[in-house]
Amino acid sequence: MSDIIGTRMASDGKTAKQLFEEVMANPARNKFGFGSKLAIVNVDFQRAYTDIHAFKTAYETDPRQIEHVNTISALARRKGMPVVWTRVGYMPGGADAGVWGTRTNTPDSLQNIAVGSERHQFDPRCVIDETRDAIYTKRMPSAFYETPLATWLVWHKVDTVIVTGGSTSGCVRATAVDALSHGYRTIVPIECVADKHESYHFANLTDLQLKYADVEPVQTVIDWLERQADV
């Protein structure tokens, strides 16, 4: 007879937000913490996902999300630390979207975000320094997949990755898991990520906090950056 004791899946009626709040209230939870140099990786702040007045695929969680992202990005630049922006985009017809683009085919479908289209455009509220920031168009969920991001971070001697953007349950999660897999301390600022439904949002923040990243208030990132020397 086996002496292994397992755990049955819990079903206690708590909401995803309640579970997240319980996990975040645990002061004994160990953190990966900050290293010596970070990069801000801003995932998919493009109109397809941020312009809630124009596109059905867009969503908003914290109305100040982009403001917070601009703040930490500006601070990172001031401290000599790299900032990266990604967006999703495909060739006309979506032939380079792979199997990810096969489930639907409507004007709102993923594979129909054409490079150069309105849906591909960065949100105009984003403050992007095109002379310093890395800008990548990606075709899969993770910002690491088939982009120069990994080598960019190595070149800049980064050991910590701050992941912002959307969606929390999709491209943010995929990027955070890949960041950890590449050996980076990974931090997800709560106010800087968004999703279509609070259930997806908080369930994935909980999972990230428990396994793959430090989920922190954005002020924690601001405070750390402000303690670093300007360059």
Image: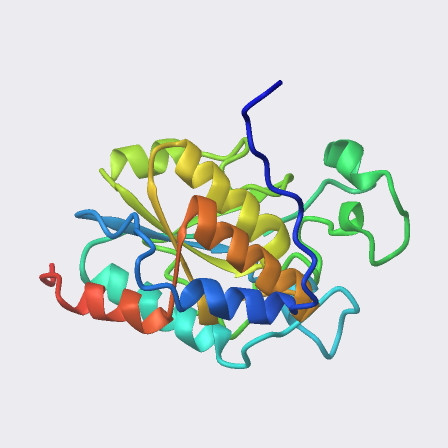
**For residue 161, above or below residue 45:** above
Q: Give the image location of residue 162, x and y in percent.
A: 37, 54
Q: Quadrant of residue 228?
A: bottom left
Residue in view at x 26 percent, y 41 percent: 159
Q: Give the image location of residue 126, x and y in percent.
A: 48, 69
Residue 221 is left or right of residue 41, and the answer is left
Quarter of the picture holding the C terminus: bottom left
Residue 95 is left or right of residue 154, and the answer is right
Q: Quadrant of residue 92?
A: top right
Quarter of the picture holding the N terminus: top right
Q: Give the image location of residue 93, x and y in percent.
A: 83, 41
Residue 148 is left or right of residue 77, and the answer is right
Residue in view at x 45 percent, y 54 percent: 209
**For residue 147, above or below residue 194:** above
Q: Quadrant of residue 94?
A: top right
Q: State whether residue 85 appears in this view.
A: no
Q: How many marks?
A: 0
Snapshot colouring: rainbow
Residue in view at x 66 percent, y 44 percent: 8
Q: Give the image location of residue 22, x and y in percent.
A: 48, 67
